[in-house]
Amino acid sequence: MCVVILYPKYHFPTFMKKFLTVLLAILAIALPAASQTQVKWRTAVRMTSDTEGVVTVKAIIPEGFHLYGTTVPEGGPVATTFDFGASKGVKFRGDMSPSSVPVTARDEAFGIDLQWWTGTVAFSQHFTITDPATAQIVLKIKYMMCNGTNCMPPRTENITIPNTRLKKK
């Protein structure tokens, strides 16, 4: 014989409404905070001729955080890297160059001297279009950032710039 005891005080739909309200309130606070701890990337293309140009990728780093440099010693965090390998109809010249020199300082989280940027930094890359019909810049950015006490997990951003933006105006 099975006996079911119902507690009228603990009405299920009322409990679920309260639970969902609390859950949604937590998510409403947590999600904007999580999005504020990501670098925002902006791109611009400046064509210097019909076939030559410069792509600039601007990193907007959240306040209180720093974006690690493009070279990091062994045992350190993930370096910021730019991979144009999936691009088509475009040849890149030289290295990606930052708009400012990174700060060099001791990072206590890793116990070594590291380079990083705060605020904003723009990275520029010169290119030549080799096939206008298929030209497309595909960029994979891998990066990591920390503040004085916490490090965010490494992230990868994928950016595609179609050939319509690779034309001189």
Image (cartoon, helix red, strand yellow):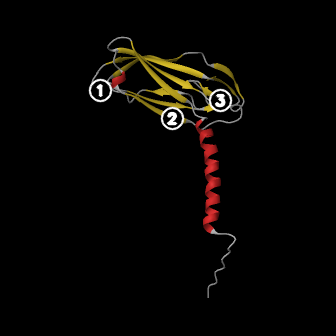
Q: Which residue is painted at 64% across and 49% down in the image?
A: 25
In the picture of the structure, the residue carrying the numbered disc 2 is: 156
Look at mark 3 in the image and give the residue it sits on.
65
Instruction: Tell me which amino acid carries mark 3.
Output: Phe
**SS for callout 1:** loop
N-terminal of the two: label 3 or label 1? 3
Q: Quadrant of the C terminus?
A: top left
Across and down, in percent, residue 91 comes to 36, 20
Q: Are marks 2 and 3 in contact (CB under 8 Å)?
A: no
- Classify residue 38 as left or right of residue 84: right
Which label sits in the foreground, 2 or 3?
Answer: 3
Residue nearest the observer in this picture, 27 or 62: 27
Q: Label 3: state its secondary structure.
A: loop
- The image shows residue 118 at horizontal and vertical percentages of 63, 23
Q: Residue at x 33, y 27 (%)?
A: 88
Name the amino acid, label 1. Thr
Q: Earlier in the sequence, mark 2 or mark 3?
A: 3
Q: Earlier in the sequence, mark 1 or mark 2?
A: 1
Residue 75 visible somewhere in the drawing:
no
Q: Residue 113: image x %, image y %?
A: 68, 24
